[in-house]
Image (cartoon, coloured by chain):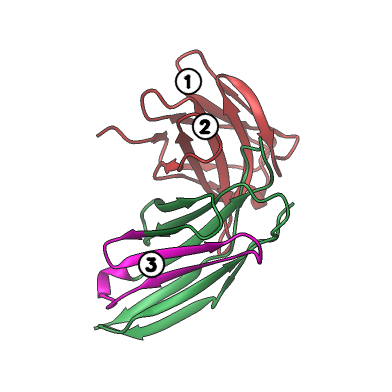
């Protein structure tokens, strides 16, 4: 069965550069979530989208932006990267309402040097 | 912002032992509670989603209960096996209509052969 696909899996950037992470949800899933997990930390919610509209916003820095496209894939854009942005970024998708279980991608590991 | 707490933080058990751990959350504005299993180098995998007080769910040797009035959920593993070694995360919504799951820090289970 198709799972949530994230790309790239690994990314190395310099400080002040820009990075874009992509997430392709499970087919027919209409909700996408982005989570950030720093070293040794629990996952922190960044932002979510339902039917291509932003549905909820968490601790996402102003330097980050995200959107969900017409094919339901989502992109997380990160600018003016800082060392503290180094983390594992998980995307998850679900079908419909808030009680649906989340299906996670394998994550994109961003390293900022 | 919800405060989801899990205990213990880590746990070592012998193969064949049964074990349980706790997830605590604010009982007000409860909407749903999720349990995820997260193995090293893999993405979190959904175990259960529970919404009603008194819910009990079971998947193989793993089961969970939910008490929304007092704000806790227990996860039980019967006859632990080495392959059960993982971090078990619980998460809950911040209220009806919210798409944001707030995760606890997890309980790291190590099963010793």
- How far across and down, in percent of the image, does residue A9 sit? 40, 41
Q: Residue at x 61, y 59 (%)?
A: B68
Name the residue carrying label 3. Answer: B86
Q: Secondary structure at mark 3?
A: strand
Of B88 and B72, the residue lying toward us: B72
- How far across and down, in percent of the image, does residue B80 sit? 29, 77
Chain under callout 2: A
Q: Residue at x 51, y 26 (%)?
A: A74
Spot the green chain and give its letter: B
- How far across and down, in percent of the image, does residue B35 sit? 47, 57
Q: Are marks 2 and 3 in contact (CB under 8 Å)?
A: no
What is the magenta range?
Answer: B58-84
- How far across and down, in percent of the image, does residue A51 sit? 55, 20
Of A77 and B107, the residue lying toward us: B107
Marks 2 and 3 sit apart, C-alpha to C-alpha, by 25 Å
Marks 1 and 3 sit apart, C-alpha to C-alpha, by 31 Å
Circles 1 and 2 on the same chain:
yes
Splitting the image into 4 quarters, where does residue A35 fall? top right
Q: Residue at x 37, y 77 (%)?
A: B110
Circles 2 and 3 on the same chain:
no
Name the residue carrying label 2. Answer: A32
Name the residue carrying label 1. Answer: A72
Q: Are marks 1 and 2 in contact (CB under 8 Å)?
A: yes
Q: Residue at x 69, y 59 (%)?
A: B27
Chain A appears what colour?
A: red
Q: Is residue A3 magenta?
A: no
Q: Secondary structure at mark 2?
A: strand
Taking the image as drawn, is residue B108 in sight?
A: yes
Marks 1 and 2 sit apart, C-alpha to C-alpha, by 8 Å
Q: Is residue B43 left or right of residue B93?
A: left
């Amino acid at each position: 069965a198709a799972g949530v696909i994230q790309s790239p899996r690994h990314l190395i950037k310099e400080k002040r550069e820009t990075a874009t992470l992509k997430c392709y949800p499970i087919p027919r899933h209409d909700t996408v979530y982005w989570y950030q997990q720093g070293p040794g930390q629990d996952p922190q919610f960044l932002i979510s989208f339902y039917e291509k509209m932003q549905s909820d916003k968490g601790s996402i820095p102003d330097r980050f932006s995200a959107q969900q496209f017409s094919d339901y894939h989502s992109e997380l854009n990160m600018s003016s990267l800082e060392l503290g942005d180094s983390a594992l970024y998980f995307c998850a998708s679900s079908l419909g309402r808030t009680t649906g279980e989340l299906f996670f991608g394998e994550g994109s590991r961003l390293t900022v040097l | 912002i919800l405060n989801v707490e899990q205990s213990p933080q880590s746990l070592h058990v012998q193969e064949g032992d049964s074990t349980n751990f706790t997830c605590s959350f604010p009982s007000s504005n409860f909407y749903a509670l999720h349990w995820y299993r997260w193995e090293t180098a893999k993405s979190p995998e959904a175990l259960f989603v529970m919404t009603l007080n008194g819910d009990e769910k079971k998947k193989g040797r793993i089961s969970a209960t939910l008490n929304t009035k007092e704000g806790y959920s227990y996860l039980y593993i019967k006859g632990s096996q080495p392959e059960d070694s993982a971090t078990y995360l619980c998460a809950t919504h911040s209220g009806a209509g919210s798409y944001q799951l707030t995760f606890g820090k997890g309980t790291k289970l190590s099963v010793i052969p």
